[in-house]
Image (cartoon, coloured by chain):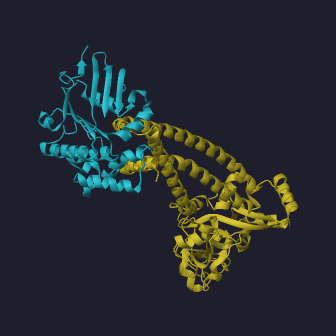
Chain colours: A cyan, B yellow
């Protein structure tokens, strides 16, 4: 469950994001839409605890993010949320398998064990990359890289999946594959999905659309001062 | 492997070209001062050990350093030779044994050391094969000289002319190799030892040729009187001393005036040494007696100063390299900003990114140190014998 209360975030003197109240039940699949610059990525970062709001509260389940320190937020994020970026952000010097297990190696809250490799290989198998786990990212296609990035986001079995335009750089076929993987995971784990997208063709697949610019989402308001 | 270490290692492994370059550069910075120090110490040790085992040296008045170095390492003498009679004079003092050394000639690049068989005993030189020279025209090769001249006991070597523009100045004498010394790891390994008289034959002070006193030799004479026969250019000197012609070899002039470049004086005891030194310092005008240990010690003091300057220079270069290396790492971190940001975004624990980046630096320095150790081991196996050759 995600809940935002009286959230206010501003930057660069002329941008303010204000959300009076927003609640996403566990298992909801929400699409975040709006034109460029309206604060979609900012919204994802706020939910991930990467950015701190000027005021207001953000709850992930019953944990209020604004009360946590930065290092606590990092610990919390790695356990609670899986992040998928538009540019994949894979580490070029790690193999596909090591990229997927990376979250388990960079924070002691999650433990890297021998079984972790098994879990990573299972995930890679499920996205059709089971044979390519020894390759480096630069030997993969765009779609394959995004699949690896999704596996990395899912390795710790997070309850919330935050995706920032994960299909923006992909062709239609790869887009459908990626969406299917994400939706399948959310269905299987009852995970909450918050995905930024410009692609109106896929909006029907979501439970909710939150348009940050058009104010058409009941309790969301983006204003430019 | 620790997770941070694993990630750091993978980064370096993936960028192996850059890593190797950095490791190589840092290892060189560590290695060069170390090897300079090692070489300087080893060199000093070797120089000193040869000097210490040579109690006294006598030679013409002049540079004591020149006399010491040319005698210990068989280099071309930079001071004029003594006359052979000085040997007799020194021995007549009854204070020391004297071993003469004539160092003016070479077989290719190997120095010919005209001396006596006493030299072998003095240097504790054992024979790998053969025996010491017994008659003129015979020689003994040092271990390295035998390899370089590709000659062994029973073979022959030919002395080289002293200079390209003075082919008649020294005699190209074919010498029979009667023995090869065991390796001593000193300048002796490089030398061709021969009898002092053989060195004089090479110098032209003595020679052998066809009999000129018989009637059949008239065609070889420019003139003849009752007591003197003057040979023409048609008379050829022998270029090899054989049992058949050895009796025809003879000296011209008084051998007492023949050249000797240095004399190794082995005093009977400390008192004899002091007396000998006192006598030569105060009473003998044209001969100097030096203590090689003191001369080398003075020389090494200069070397030590040079070494200190070199070490200081190496440390400065090292510090500069360290700064550049840190700059390289900091620039690399700037270039990897996005990667670092990703790690933060996906939840890297506080300090883990710093840990990974620090470990990369530690690994590079550890690899550099390992490479330096490898160099040092290689130097120990290959470089030191090379160094020994250089300082012999």
Vertical arrangement, residue B135 with respect to residue B113, above or below: below
In this rendering, position of residue B176 left or right of residue A172: right
**In the rendered image, which quarter is residue A194 located in?**
top left
Q: Position of residue B91 (x, y in %)?
A: 81, 67
Vertical arrangement, residue B53 with respect to residue A37, above or below: below
Q: Position of residue B190 (x, y in %)?
A: 59, 67
> How many marks can you see?
0
Task: Locate the C terminus of chain A and report the quarter of the image it occupies.
Answer: top left
Please indicate, yes or no, whether residue A213 appears anywhere in the rendered image. Answer: yes
- Residue at image point 43% right, 30% down: A68
- Residue at image point 51% right, 54% down: B370
* Foreground pick, A177 / A194: A194
In this rendering, position of residue B56 left or right of residue B363: right
Task: Locate the N terminus of chain A and report the quarter of the image it occupies.
Answer: top left
Vertical arrangement, residue A49 with respect to residue B375, above or below: above
Q: Position of residue B84 (x, y in %)?
A: 73, 66
* Foreground pick, A32 / B120: A32
Q: Position of residue B153 (x, y in %)?
A: 58, 80
Please indicate, yes or no, whether residue A135 appears anywhere in the rendered image. Answer: no
**In the rendered image, which quarter is residue A73 located in?**
top left
């Amino acid at each position: 469950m995600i809940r935002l209360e009286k959230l206010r975030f501003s930057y660069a003197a002329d941008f303010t994001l204000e959300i009076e109240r927003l609640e996403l039940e566990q298992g909801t699949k929400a699409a975040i839409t709006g034109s460029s610059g309206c604060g979609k990525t900012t919204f994802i970062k706020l939910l991930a605890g990467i950015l701190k709001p000027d005021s207001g509260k953000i709850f992930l389940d019953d944990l209020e993010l604004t009360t946590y320190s930065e290092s606590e937020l990092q610990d919390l994020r790695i356990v609670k949320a899986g992040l998928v970026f538009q540019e994949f952000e894979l580490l070029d010097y790690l193999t596909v398998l090591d990229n997927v297990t990376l979250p388990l190696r960079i924070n002691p809250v999650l433990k890297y064990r021998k079984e972790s490799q098994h879990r990573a290989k299972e995930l890679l198998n499920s996205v059709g990359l089971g044979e390519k786990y020894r390759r480096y990212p630069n030997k993969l296609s765009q779609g394959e890289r995004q699949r690896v990035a999704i596996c990395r986001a899912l390795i710790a079995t997070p309850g919330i999946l935050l995706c920032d335009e994960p299909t923006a750089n992909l062709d239609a076929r790869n887009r459908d594959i990626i969406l299917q993987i994400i939706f399948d995971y959310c269905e299987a784990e009852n995970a909450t999905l918050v995905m930024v997208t410009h692609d109106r063709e896929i909006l029907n697949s979501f439970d909710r659309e939150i348009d940050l610019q058009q104010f058409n989402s009941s309790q969301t308001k983006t204003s430019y001062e | 492997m620790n997770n941070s270490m694993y990630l750091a290692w993978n980064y370096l492994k993936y960028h192996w070209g850059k890593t190797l370059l950095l490791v190589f550069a840092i290892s060189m910075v560590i290695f060069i001062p170390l090897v300079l120090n090692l070489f300087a110490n080893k060199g000093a040790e070797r120089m000193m050990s040869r000097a210490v085992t040579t109690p006294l040296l006598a030679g013409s008045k002049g540079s004591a350093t020149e006399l010491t170095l040319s005698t210990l390492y068989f280099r071309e003498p930079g001071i004029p030779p003594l006359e052979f009679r000085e040997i007799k004079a020194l021995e007549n003092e009854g204070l020391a044994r004297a071993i003469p050394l004539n160092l003016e000639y070479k077989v290719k690049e190997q120095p010919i050391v005209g001396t006596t068989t006493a030299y072998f005993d003095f240097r504790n030189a054992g024979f790998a094969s053969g025996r010491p020279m017994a008659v003129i025209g015979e020689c003994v090769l040092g271990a390295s000289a035998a390899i370089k001249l590709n000659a062994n006991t029973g073979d022959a070597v030919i002395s080289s002319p002293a200079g390209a523009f003075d082919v008649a100045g020294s005699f190209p004498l074919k010498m029979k190799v009667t023995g090869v010394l065991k390796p001593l790891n000193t300048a002796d390994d490089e030398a061709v030892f021969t009898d002092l008289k053989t060195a004089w034959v090479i110098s032209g002070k003595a020679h052998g040729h066809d009999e000129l006193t018989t009637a059949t030799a008239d065609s070889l004479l420019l003139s003849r009187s009752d007591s003197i026969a003057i040979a023409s250019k048609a008379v050829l000197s022998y270029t090899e001393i054989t049992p058949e012609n050895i009796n025809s070899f003879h000296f011209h002039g008084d051998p007492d005036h023949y050249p000797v470049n240095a004399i190794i004086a082995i005093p009977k005891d400390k008192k004899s040494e002091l007396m000998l030194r006192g006598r030569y310092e105060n009473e003998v005008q044209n001969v100097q007696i030096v203590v090689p240990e003191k001369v080398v010690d003075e020389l090494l003091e200069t070397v030590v100063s040079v070494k200190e300057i070199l070490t200081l220079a190496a440390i400065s270069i090292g510090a500069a390299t360290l700064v550049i290396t840190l700059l390289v790492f900091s620039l690399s971190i700037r270039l990897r900003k996005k990667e670092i940001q990703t790690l933060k975004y996906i939840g890297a624990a506080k300090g883990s990114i710093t840990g990974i980046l620090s470990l990369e630096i530690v690994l590079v320095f550890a690899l550099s140190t390992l490479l330096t150790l490898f160099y040092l081991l290689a130097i120990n196996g290959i470089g030191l014998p090379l160094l020994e050759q250089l300082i012999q």
